[in-house]
Image (tube, grey):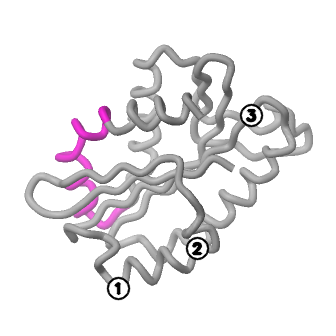
Amino acid sequence: MKALSLFEQVVSRHFSSKVTELQAFGKTGYSFEEWFNWELYYALGASDSNLAPKPTYKAHGLDASKKTGDVFFSLGDENFIIEVALVHDYTQDKWLEKIRLDRDHLMTLKQVDGITPIQLIAMVSGYNDIMAQESWSTWLESLTFWNTPRDVDIKLRLPTEGQAWIIGWSL
């Protein structure tokens, strides 16, 4: 999908310039997912896409849903709703259920013509290779969809030590 390739390029370029912030926020032990979502929104806005923060599923064809996504964007004639989960060394276990629920919600969008749901997981770690750490690899492999092909796969080296890894799946 051409739009997903462009999306990956935009996200990679933008967050490559944010590695200092990613590292600093990751060390706090607190969630900074909302910051990430707004940075994602800003990056997509610079790419001439039509976008909206916190899109309601109802506005995009699921009349009974009260769910909101994190970002809506369109490139060309393709429309996407993204759900983001941001995890780091201190919060990773808290987010397993959130990630599963995000995926369940996104799966309901598959029935809507013209919308491609995207699940994005952003990981920030003090480890230089996230998958080489047993705590991370065990955690990630517990996700039922972990071994399915990814549409977004961005690894960023953090300034002094560590890695940010942004991965995503279109559903």
Q: Residues within 10 Å of mark 1 (few under 14, many from 20)?
A: few
Give, as a single range, the part of the protein colored magenta.
13-30
Q: Quadrant of residue 137?
A: bottom left
On the question of residue 24 being in view, the answer is no
For residue 101, side relative to residue 129 (left or right): right
Lower position in the chain sequence, tag 1 or tag 2: 1
Please state which amino acid type lies under the numbered disc 2.
Leu
Q: Residues within 10 Å of mark 2 (few under 14, many from 20)?
A: few
Please state which amino acid type lies under the numbered disc 1.
Glu
On the question of residue 118 being in view, the answer is yes
For residue 115, side relative to residue 147 (left or right): right
Label 2 sits on residue: 143
Q: Quadrant of residue 136?
A: bottom left
Q: Looking at the image, which is closer to me, 90 or 47?
A: 47
**Which label number is shown at residue 115?**
3
Lower position in the chain sequence, tag 3 or tag 1: 3
Q: Looking at the image, which is closer to me, 6 or 25?
A: 6
| Secondary structure predominantly adopted by residues drawn in magenta | helix
Q: CA distance from mark 3 to mark 1?
A: 36 Å
Q: Element type at marker 3?
A: strand
Residue 20 magenta:
yes
Q: In the figure, 85 relative to 50: above or below?
A: below
Residue at 67% in and 33% down: 55
